[in-house]
Amino acid sequence: MTCLILGNNLYACDLLQKTASSASYLELTGTCADALEASAFLQKRPVDLLLISDEIPGITGLDFLKSLFAPPLAILIASTPDHAAEAFDLMVADYLVKPFNSARFAAALQRAKEIFEGRGVTKKKVEKDAIFVRSGNALLKIRFDEILWAQALGDYVVFQLEEKKYTVHTTLRLVAERLPSEKFVRIHRSYIVALEKVESVEEGCRVILHNQPLPVSERFRTGLLEQLNLL
């Protein structure tokens, strides 16, 4: 399990380096002092686990995690427990409040390892052509080829199909992890679209699906164009 440290927490760096030397499952691949450096690192070399300290210039660890399209597992290190609930809503592996000892740190890494290994098992069992969403007391199957787009609305995601839509209490980040990347692409912080449903891409930074214009942000424009079969 590869790991990147973000922040200037020397104590955490030292603990992780010592743990990595004694744990065969863990490999420390780098340390970054700020968000820009970490973003550049992750683009070139994705990791399995991100250890984020709250000592990051200009941004909180939580906000950095939110900025990532498909973030890895993360352990957050904070000075107070104030944002623990929000962190676990983002499905972090653990939330450490300073000061903490080596035993607590090792427990957090073990928890991350178990979640990481569990994800591998889960992915093998996921259907190849559909997802299931909760609607009331039932789980409803949505085939990938039925989805036009998914839209984030607060704490919910709306799955738009041709004839109907489903509103699900989840995050667009989690939806992005469940949808196959060869069939879907993110075009905006609030939208993921089905590539085969895209009818046109207009100069005004928008795409047309099912006669509906959707915005394309500059951040995701390049990724969209790379996945289109351009002549």
Image (cartoon, rainbow, N blue to C red):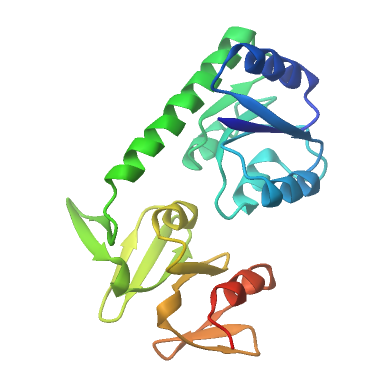
Work out whether residue 35 or residue 171 is closer to the camera in this orientation and state it.
35
- Residue at x-position 51% and y-position 31%: 93
Q: Is residue 186 left or right of residue 178?
A: right
Work out whether residue 136 or residue 134 is closer to the camera in this orientation and state it.
134
Find the residue positioned furthest to the left.
138
Q: Is residue 189 left or right of residue 39?
A: left
- Residue at x-position 64% and y-position 18%: 20
Which image quadrant is residue 59 in?
top right
Q: Is residue 92 above or below residue 139?
A: above
Question: Where does the image place residue 170, in percent across and percent down from the top left?
Answer: 40, 52
Q: Is residue 204 above or below residue 102?
A: below
Find the residue positioned furthest to the front.
231
Task: Point out the image quarter for the N terminus.
Answer: top right
Question: Where does the image place residue 212, in percent across and percent down from the top left?
Answer: 44, 87
Question: Where does the image place residue 141, in percent across and percent down from the top left?
Answer: 21, 60
- Residue at x-position 63% and y-position 9%: 102
Work out whether residue 67 or residue 199 is closer to the camera in this orientation and state it.
199
Question: Where does the image place residue 218, in percent across and percent down from the top left?
Answer: 69, 73
Task: Point out the image quarter for the C terminus.
Answer: bottom right
Q: Is residue 227 above or below residue 105?
A: below
Q: Is residue 15 above or below residue 213?
A: above
Q: Is residue 90 left or right of residue 158?
A: right
Residue 138 in view: yes
